[in-house]
Amino acid sequence: MVDLQKFLDESPDGVIYFSMGSNLRSSNMKNATKEAFLEAFSKLKQRVLWKWEADSLPGQPSNVKLGKWLPQSDILAHPNVRLFITQGGLLSTQEAIDRGVPIVGIPIHADQRYNLARVVSFGIGIQLDFENITTESVMWALNEVLNNQSYRKNVQRISRIYRDQPLTPLQQAVYWTEYVIRHTGAPHLRSAALDLAWYQYFLLDVTTVPALVAVCLLVTTYIISRAVIGRLFHTMPRKTASAVKKND
C-alpha cells in the first residue's frame, strides 16, 4: 500500500487506472489485445495502474504498475487519477461517477453495454469494442478523454448531483435498520410478491393464454391444410378418369 500511495503521489502527469473487474482476468486476454494496450501505454506520459492477476507481464512498459488486487474506490478518489478504463460493471460505473473520474469503457456482457451507453450519453466517457481493440483505437480513446476537458467537467457535475444526498450510505443503513426494529419488522413494507402462488410466480397465468392460442392456431392450420390437401388429391383421380373417357 505504501508503494501504491507513492506511485499515485509521484505522478504529476496523472494516472490511468485499468481494471476489467472480476469477470475478465486481464492476464487471460488475447495476445494481440494485450500487445495493443502495452504499445498504447508505452506512448503515454501518464502512468498506468493495471489490475493484473499474473505474477509478471512480458513487455511491461516502465510507466505501468501492476497489482493483483487494488482498492478501487480509494484509487479513484486520488486527485492524480485522470481516467478509468473499465468493463462497465454497475459498481465500477457508480464508483467512477462518485469519484468524478471519466471513463473509457470496454464492455463484455449485455448489462455493461447498457451501463456504458448511459456513460456515453451523459458525456462522461467513451466506449470501445473489446473484439476490435487496436493500439490506434486505445490511443484515440485515451487522448480524447484526457485532452477533452468536457468529459471531466461532465462527470464532476454529475458526481456533485450524485453525492448531494440528505444522508450518507452508512447513515441510511443505520436509519432503515432502526426503522425496521421500531416497527416490529415493518410488515407494511413487505412485498406482495412474497405471497404469490407458485403459478403466478412463474407467470403461468400470463403465459398460458397466449400459449393456448398459439396451439389452437397451429392445430386449426393443420386441420385446414390436411382437409384442403385431401380434397385436392380426392378430385384429381376423377378429373383424370373423365379425361380418359373423352379420349376414348
Image (cartoon, helix red, strand yellow):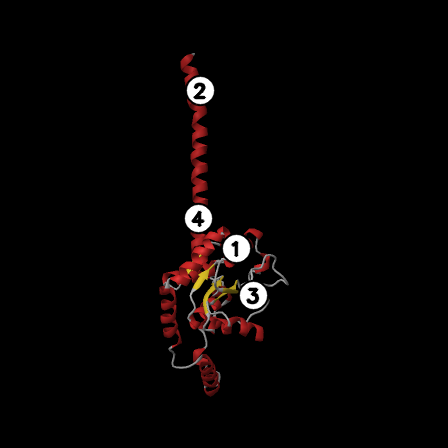
Cα–Cα gap, marks 1 and 3: 15 Å
Q: Dot 1 lies on which element?
A: helix
Nearer to us: label 2 or label 1 = 1
For the point 46% across and 71% down, the residue is 80
Provide residue 88's location: percent of width, then percent of height.
47, 63
Q: Amino acid at mark 2?
A: Ala
Provide residue 128's location: percent of width, then percent of height.
45, 56
Quarter of the image with the N terminus in it = bottom right
Q: Dot 3 lies on which element?
A: strand
Query: In the image, which disc is placed on residue 136?
Result: none
Nearer to us: label 2 or label 4 = 4
Query: In the image, which disc is placed on residue 241?
Result: 2
Q: Residues within 10 Å of mark 4 (few under 14, many from 20)?
A: few
Nearer to us: label 3 or label 4 = 3
Disc 4 vs disc 1: Cβ atoms closer than 8 Å?
no
What residue would you read off at disc 4? 216
Q: Amino acid at mark 4?
A: Cys
